[in-house]
Amino acid sequence: MPTLTVDGVEVTVDPGTTVLQACEEAGAEIPRFCYHERLSIAGNCRMCLVEMEKAPKLIASCAMPAGDGMVIHTNTQKVKEGREGAMEFLLINHPLDCPICDQGGECDLQDQSMAYGSGNSRYHEMKRAVTEKNMGPLIKTTMTRCIHCTRCVRFATEVAGVEELGAINRGENMEIATYLEQALDSELSGNIIDLCPVGALTSKPYAFTARPWELSKTESIDVLDAVGANIRVDSRGKEVMRFLPRLNEDVNEEWLSDRSRFSYDGLKAQRLDTPYVRKDETLQPASWGEAFDAIAAKLEGVEGAKIGAIAGDLACAESMIALKDLMNLLESPNIDCRQDGAALTTESRSGYLFNTTIAGIDEADALLIVGSNPRHEAALINARIRKRWKAGNFPVALIGEQVDLTYSYDYLGAGPATLKEVAEGKHSFAETLKKAERPMIIVGQGALSRNDGAAVLALAKKIADDYGFASDDWNGFNVLHTAAARVAGLDLGFVSGEGGKSAREMLDGSLDVLFLLGADEINTSKLTNSFVIYQGSHGDAGASAADVILPGAAYTEKDATWVNTEGRVQLGRRAIFPPGDAREDWTILRALSEKLGKTLPYNTIRELREKMIEVAPHFADIDQVTSADWGAFGTDGAIDDAPFVNPITDYYLTNPISRSSRIMAECSATFSKVKGEGTGTNG
Amino acid sequence: MSQVIETGKAFEFTAENVEKAQKFIARYPEGRQQSAVMPLLDLAQRQNENWLSKEVLEYVGNYLNVPYMRVLEVATFYTMYNLKPVGKYFLQLCRTTPCWLRGSDDLEAVCKNKLGITNGETTEDGMFSLLEVECLGACVNAPVVQINDDFYEDLNAENFEVVLDKLAKGEVPPKGPQIDRTNSAPEGGPTTLLEKTEGA
């Protein structure tokens, strides 16, 4: 453990630490552009210069390993002049266009030039100009501003795993570009906007819409996949202007996937901002009173068994418990939160969680993916897997659709038959799993949302049991969810009770009244005889099939609890108010229950959350993963030969908010269609 | 604006070059075969009329399993790789100080007057291309022009014209110094150590 002195402060650091990190540990601030904790070291901006005793020149602290007995100074005149010099060089070709630059106000170059620059330039020659590069619909480029830190290139290569971005030419002619100016095809591409320390790469959809200092910042949770990435909602007035990731080492590190980052314009489009009631075959705007009257009149005299409720992918825990309680009061056993028909049950919590936890992937030493494309279903988890894979000694195998996961894997087969072979030890990969000390299996919704889903789950459980996936300090069994609502729904028991119908059975038209809580990814064609009540935020499939629409709040418009695929309970916070007459979802259900004479026993969100904790005590542990005991789940049964089909066909259009987003539509046209054509010709 | 030119013509190594390529690849340790990108680009360039088209770049990328962008980075970094078609004779005229002092401007004037081309241009008949380059490392024989793989040294306007005339006729003038001199030995023969020392 090297011990070194930084500005008179002695620090002891782990071997392999750089001088820059040691300085930070000692409390000294080191300016930097190219250095980034999560990327490889480049050492090309020269901004992190510090003085090391016995060294003839200043050293680049980011690239110098800390050594025992080093004496470092970070605040001498020599260092000050060195930084001023580096800054002057960086600014030689950087345009002074801060007033028209979107990075203005949150620009590393601007800030550090104020803090460490000399304040004037001795350069009188012409600055170089670089043509704009096309990087697709999300990233706007102003390459004249680029200072060639190569953070974006390193991110794309190392974290995102797409080697399309690079530096062409050399010296003064060096330029950052994608190969042949193609759009950067990655689900994580938006992160290079955050990484860019200058205004060279900025957000195309956000361009010229707001300045950072006029935005209200609300810390919240992303719900467009089941990762539960921590986000910051930047809003102005009643508009969400953008989403940014928030640091959470256990979940998203500091990344955010493109769908979660850029779907924000979907929050302003296709909104249900007033109740609707179907009259004369068309949906017509109505008041809350009229909508509730219509529901009360319809429910009059209908027996509980003829009423049902389905919770969709974006339903918050609060609204689900309220709806569940209401259905109980109406004596209906027909409730289901698994609108995709996944064969997950509530009998054992470990049977539907990502038990390893996302951070736990770092410790795994073998992985089997079954019926899932984590790149599309949970892009940030895929980035974690890639990070682990890059560290080496990490055999990965896949059963399901053969897709590009950004890391190499053994392709074992397409369907459950292969899974059975592995489970019975007949497959060579079974040996690898047996030998591994911390093996993992990831079961996707593509493997579970089938008629034989329960049998597939049982096979996965058998693999986990037989090959030692679950021990005292390790649980390698993982279900990867695609919906932010699913785990909370299962935790709260939003599943059909005794004699109750599943979502699939409810959708066959046999019910008199069906309540859809934001359920849109369903087949509504057989619901012509059912009276459909849709509560949600966007006019999508569910709303068009509805007889009464109750306008709810989107995730940025309510305080709500979300449970991610790991079982981590996180609180989303309200950034803006719902549009028009839309209301927070649990309050709608509370008001409706009163109208129906079955008043729900809570008046405030606090009382509601107390009820939630009563049902599932881990809801009290915010931001924590409560590990689940290894129990029995899955049902042995016959398996089908049909190959697994991944649930997501278009990464950019998985939920009503993204489907309403023009940005996502453009991305889908740019990326998904091209891919579709490519595979279409392959038969 | 892309620097890469697509020809629509597929590229493939000849059997002979495949053998060479395998030798290049074998020079690198197991798992590091991608390092052979530079010799392979050179090999491909020689086979493809001394330049690299999009098809060639991608062929090399596929051959070594290197992403196309990484190949392009290498190809644009080094000036020795030509990304657009060049003439049959690729003249690389050294403009660095020693050659300049010894009259590289005169050679440039010859190209302009005789061939009608300036830096970066190719003659209409596709015979000659001119590229000004930095030091070729033959300062002792300045000024120097590299024509394809060979150095033509100790040039002046007259003997450079002779070289160009011969090339135009399809002859191959002898490479090296174009004046009475062996390699970088003194002009007109040795000037020192002419007598044998005693005992030697």
Image: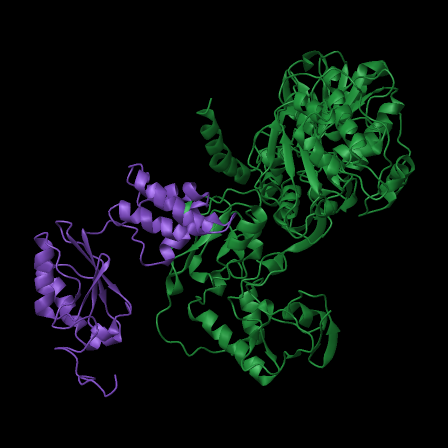
Count of numbered badges drawn on the protein? 0
**Chain shown in purple:** B
User: In this orientation, which residue lies closer to the viewer: B30 or A295?
Assistant: B30
Q: Is residue A285 visible?
A: no
Given the current orientation, which residue lies at the most extreme front position?
Answer: B199
Above-or-below relation of A222 to B157: above
Q: Residue at x 40, y 76 (%)?
A: A123
Residue A276 x %, y %? 68, 26
**Chain shown in green:** A
Above-or-below relation of B144 to B46: below
Above-or-below relation of A372 to A514: below
User: In this orientation, which residue lies closer to the viewer: A321 or A588?
Assistant: A321
Colouring:
by chain
Q: Residue at x 71, y 33 (%)?
A: A431
Q: Residue at x 24, y 49 (%)?
A: B85
Quadrant of the rendered image containing residue A656: top right
* A204 with respect to A563 (left or right): left
* A439 with respect to A204 (left or right): right
Quadrant of the rendered image containing residue A581: top right
